[in-house]
Image (cartoon, rainbow, N blue to C red):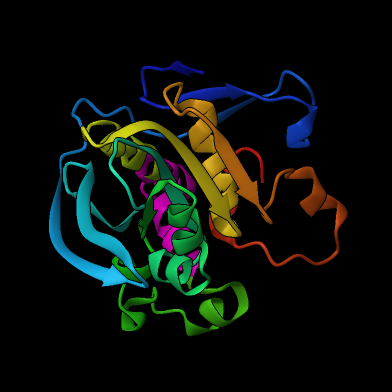
Amino acid sequence: YKDTAAGSATLTVSTAAGLTPGTQVVVYVEKQSFAPAGEVVGQVESHGLRVERVVYRSEADIAVPGLLFWPEGEGPHPGLVFVHGQGKEAAVASGWAGRLARGGFAVLAIDFRGIGETAPPPQRDGGHPYDAFLLGSQANVSRSALYVGRSLFGMRVLDVMQGAAYLRGRGDVRGVGVAGTGAGALLALYAGALDENVSYVVAHRGLYAYRRLTESLFHSHPFSLFLPGVL
């Protein structure tokens, strides 16, 4: 992985990614010159666990909300950014956040941009209800990003990487990994590949090879997971 003049990242893939070995894929993840400042904006209790409501900056004008679940006992605790494809509330409802916290991790479940609290209002769905019905509401958000020369997928990967950086900057967390399920699995994989400070990566029930999409007549993966130059 290397930075380019355009601020993108180049990742050389292997056969595991479903591409020809040595293929270089450009993921537009703009390099940030600032640490992701964050703050705790509230605290609640969920099923016996202490939960902080946090907000951190992924870019200068992009705020990412999250729920930080704390395990019992004194820290510092190992940190984990958990990326559920449907956002932080789904991470809670599915039981993932609570189970991981009870396993000893400080779990930060996030709403990466375009999901949950960061989703655009339904009435602003690009003005194309048929496209939203056919391709999903995220397709219009992805297309809007391409219009301005950016990749929604790359921006979401940045949100995950900045979440990991936020946890590393806290004194009550030691060692930070990323994990994702569903559409969040591929975001976690790329964040771990591009950020050398990520200690470990876990991907669950997600897309792992773009080639599989070309081999299948039908698939349920959203357009927001596609990378320019790959699909």
Q: Is residue 186 above or below residue 131?
A: above
> Which residue ends up furthest to the front in the rendered image?
73
The number of callouts visible is: 0
146 with respect to 231 (left or right): left
Q: Is residue 54 above or below residue 229?
A: below
Q: Visible in this render: residue 150?
A: no
Residue lying at 39% horizontally and 76% vertically, measured from the top left:
125
Nearer-the-camera pick, 180 or 176 = 176
Q: Position of residue 205 (x, y in %)?
A: 69, 56
Q: Is residue 149 magenta?
A: yes
Q: Is residue 83 magenta?
A: no
116 with respect to 128 (left or right): left
Q: Position of residue 127 (x, y in %)?
A: 39, 79
Q: Position of residue 63 (x, y in %)?
A: 21, 53
Q: Is residue 188 above or below residue 1?
A: below
Magenta stretch secondary structure, dominant: helix
Residue lying at 51% horizontally and 68% vertically, measured from the top left:
95
Residue lying at 66% horizontally and 40% vertically, measured from the top left:
230
Nearer-the-camera pick, 65 or 81 = 81
Nearer-the-camera pick, 83 or 96 = 96
Q: Visible in this render: residue 139?
A: yes
Residue lying at 18% horizontally and 28% vertically, measured from the top left:
34
134 with respect to 64 (left or right): right
Q: Position of residue 208 (x, y in %)?
A: 71, 44
Q: Quadrant of the rendered structure where residue 80 is?
A: top left
Task: Tell me the magenta residue range.
Answer: 138-159
